[in-house]
Image (cartoon, grey):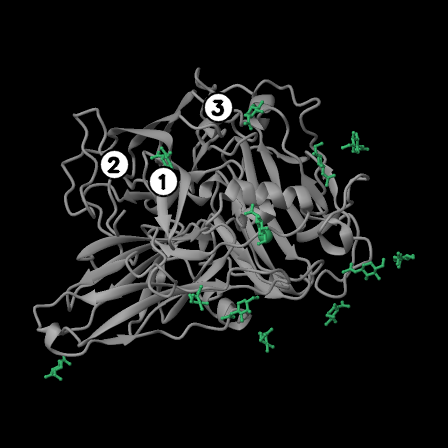
Amino acid sequence: MGAAFPSLTFPMGAFLVALSIFLVLPEFSAGITRHFKFDIKLQNVTRLCHTRSMVTVNGRFPGPKIVVREGDRVVVKVVNHVQNNITIHWHGIRQFRNGWADGPAYVTQCPIQTGQSYVYDFTIVGQRGTLWWHAHHSWLRATVYGPLVILPKRGIPYPFPKPYKEVPILLGEWFNEDPEAVIAQALQTGAGPNVSEAYTINGLPGPLYNCSAKDTFKLNVKPGKRYLLRLINAALNDDLFFSIANHSMTVVETDASYVKPLQMDTILIGPGETTNILLHTKPASPNATFFMLARPYNTGLGTIDNTTVAGLLDYASTSNKNLFPVVLLKPTLPAINDTAAAANFSTKLRSLASAQFPANVPQTVDRRFYFTVGLGTSPCPKNQTCQGPNGTKFAASVNNVSFAFPSMALLQAHYMEQSKGVYTTDFPNNPPFQFNYTGTPPNNTFVTNATKVVALPFNTSVELVMQDTSIQGAESHPLHLHGNNFYVVGQGFGNYDPMKDPAKFNLVDPVERNTAGVPSGGWAAIRFRADNPGVWLMHCHFDVHLSWGLRMAWVVNDGPLPSQKLLPPPSDLPKC
Ligand SMILES: *[C@@H]1O[C@H](CO)[C@@H](O)[C@H](O)[C@H]1NC(C)=O
Ligand SMILES: *[C@@H]1O[C@H](CO)[C@@H](O)[C@H](O)[C@H]1NC(C)=O
Ligand SMILES: *[C@@H]1O[C@H](CO)[C@@H](O)[C@H](O)[C@H]1NC(C)=O
Ligand SMILES: *[C@@H]1O[C@H](CO)[C@@H](O)[C@H](O)[C@H]1NC(C)=O
Ligand SMILES: *[C@@H]1O[C@H](CO)[C@@H](O)[C@H](O)[C@H]1NC(C)=O
Ligand SMILES: *[C@@H]1O[C@H](CO)[C@@H](O)[C@H](O)[C@H]1NC(C)=O
Ligand SMILES: *[C@@H]1O[C@H](CO)[C@@H](O)[C@H](O)[C@H]1NC(C)=O
Ligand SMILES: *[C@@H]1O[C@H](CO)[C@@H](O)[C@H](O)[C@H]1NC(C)=O
Ligand SMILES: *[C@@H]1O[C@H](CO)[C@@H](O)[C@H](O)[C@H]1NC(C)=O
Ligand SMILES: *[C@@H]1O[C@H](CO)[C@@H](O)[C@H](O)[C@H]1NC(C)=O
Ligand SMILES: *[C@@H]1O[C@H](CO)[C@@H](O)[C@H](O)[C@H]1NC(C)=O
Ligand SMILES: *[C@@H]1O[C@H](CO)[C@@H](O)[C@H](O)[C@H]1NC(C)=O
Ligand SMILES: [Cu+2]
């Protein structure tokens, strides 16, 4: 598959989805219904001289790009032709009153089983920008993912200069082995999972890997133009630094929320996060080709894939490049463990907070929560030898609870008022025992295992401080909240101090996101208003931590008005 993004065209002839890199958009009025079909099927894909049969959407890797407008209704029929159970998540879509279309397996739905289908039906309200879709069961999102671009309503311009072209840049991870086998083996042995062989840009590892030069993403640009790069980190387990040689980038949006323009040479993007960048090309074609590079930021103790993916920025000029030796310029990326560089980026982001796009930060708080997030261990089953720390199994938790998925979907249990035996509402508001979270850990690091949620009345204003722990190594954790955006009102290193730190909170123009990094050896404070009734998963977007249990759920109860109630489930909702 080449570097270009094949867009989805679908059988319902009346509709036309954007062609190529959205140069052409047919006339649409607000509120169009757009139909898509996702056939989940196997496809053989070759990278690094390894051919793998992988689970894909419509045989494509990465998956098809969906382009819609704010206000549109999106109807996606997903048909499962593979042996794996699967679900699809529309990452960052609010899904007002409509958790049935959110997608995380055993949270909002049972998986779509072999031979079954399910129609995801949702309307995009008050959102525009770059989001993405991906599988939300086990590690299937390693290959099942694609861009979800929401254009502003017709006639509404971007709050930045109009780009000449818009280009999705999907950062991903390539495994020579089946990622499902990798996570199954890790959960069995208790050890950390095998790491990937390569990172990819739009599915292509690029020339820094063996047997890969032909699989290089190349962005041909013209001089003196503005390009909107829609960056998506679809990697399974890695925060990534990204930079383009000799070009500075202006960040204008993160997680489909506009930010104050921020000029940077290097950006950091966590898995789950999206970042829109305006790239202003050189006024005249230079005699050079420029590398764009991505490689991880990581401070953990385990082995990671520390390789570098490269793509090319090429001035496809009329200049007689062939006559002159082409200079290949590489950017310098921060060191893999450069926490200062990571914080230098994340602490600079600010909401645009304009009259048209205000930052509606909750100024008062109804409920406060303090959650530790991090790794721990669970005991080795009697019969077994385990390969995790000290012969235990790796686990991960929030407030020491490693969240166990039930055997039915939480949202169904909630809707039918049949939570008994499925979940309890006693999720701890604070860590169950106190210690120096970022210092020397206690000697017993075993986590507990339960399906506990926090229940919130409709419209509760929530402040949540997430605290990294250094049990098994301090590490950043990209925390993703489903069904809601939140404001990152503060962050810092060491242990959060409830007496001193709130004075430094930004309640004016904090960045609005759906995924935010809890700093390695530090904390992040977020605020959100629980105005979306349903059950919303919150989890680390490193799939290895997610699999180890770094996940929990919020149950937001119905409000008094009819417009504040969870909608009834669709008739084709999969059964367990
Ligand atoms: C993938 O390759 C295998 C082995 O060559 C072949 O048997 C199989 O049919 C191929 N699958 C697809 C979907 O093309
Ligand atoms: C993981 O790596 C080990 C060591 O290289 C190898 O023996 C094992 O087969 C790998 N597991 C999977 C699932 O690929
Ligand atoms: C590429 O192949 C060469 C020769 O086989 C080997 O020495 C080198 O380590 C390989 N590099 C990578 C990144 O795998
Ligand atoms: C490209 O290189 C040629 C030959 O060295 C030179 O004449 C020309 O000015 C260069 N162009 C740019 C834009 O640097
Ligand atoms: C990547 O990790 C390997 C194994 O841990 C190590 O040998 C190598 O030096 C590292 N490479 C870089 C560029 O850090
Ligand atoms: C990063 O890693 C290097 C090499 O392993 C080490 O020398 C350095 O102290 C580390 N820096 C930080 C901030 O941990
Ligand atoms: C948690 O509970 C599940 C389901 O009962 C079980 O499979 C798993 O091994 C348990 N994990 C731990 C860490 O006890
Ligand atoms: C131990 O392993 C044996 C054989 O695999 C199995 O029959 C038995 O149930 C296991 N015991 C426990 C306590 O898991
Ligand atoms: C492993 O266990 C030993 C003895 O119980 C203990 O001294 C050591 O600190 C443990 N190591 C880790 C990494 O937990
Ligand atoms: C926690 O541990 C860190 C690292 O050892 C240390 O710098 C800090 O002073 C400790 N904090 C408290 C409150 O003990
Ligand atoms: C763990 O720490 C507790 C409290 O400090 C202590 O009582 C206990 O003996 C320690 N256990 C081990 C195995 O070191
Ligand atoms: C698929 O999901 C169903 C419902 O939860 C479950 O019973 C079944 O074991 C799963 N199948 C596989 C292959 O995981
Ligand atoms: Cu994590």
Q: Which amino acid does label 2 sit on?
A: Leu
Corner quadrant of residue 417: top right
Q: What residue type is labelled 1?
A: Asn
Q: Is residue 232 left or right of residue 527?
A: left
Which residue is labeled 3 in the image? 113
Q: Is mark 1 on a helix, strand or loop?
A: strand
Tell me if the residue at label 3 has its CB under 8 Å from ligand 12: yes
Measured in 3D between alpha carbons, the distance from the residue under mark 3 to the one under mark 1, in whole angstroms, is 22 Å
Q: Which amino acid does label 3 sit on?
A: Gln
- In this orientation, does residue 406 appear? yes
> Could you tell me which quadrant the C terminus lies in?
top right
Q: Is residue 101 above or below residue 391?
A: above
Gap in angstroms between the C-alphas marked 2 and 1: 20 Å
Q: Name the one closer to the observer, 536 or 37.
A: 37
Residue at image mark 2? 8
Mark 2 vs mark 1: in front: 1
Return the disc, 2 or 1, that comes first in the chain's sequence.
Answer: 2
Disc 3 crowd, CA 10 A, few/some/many (<14, 14-19, 20+)? many
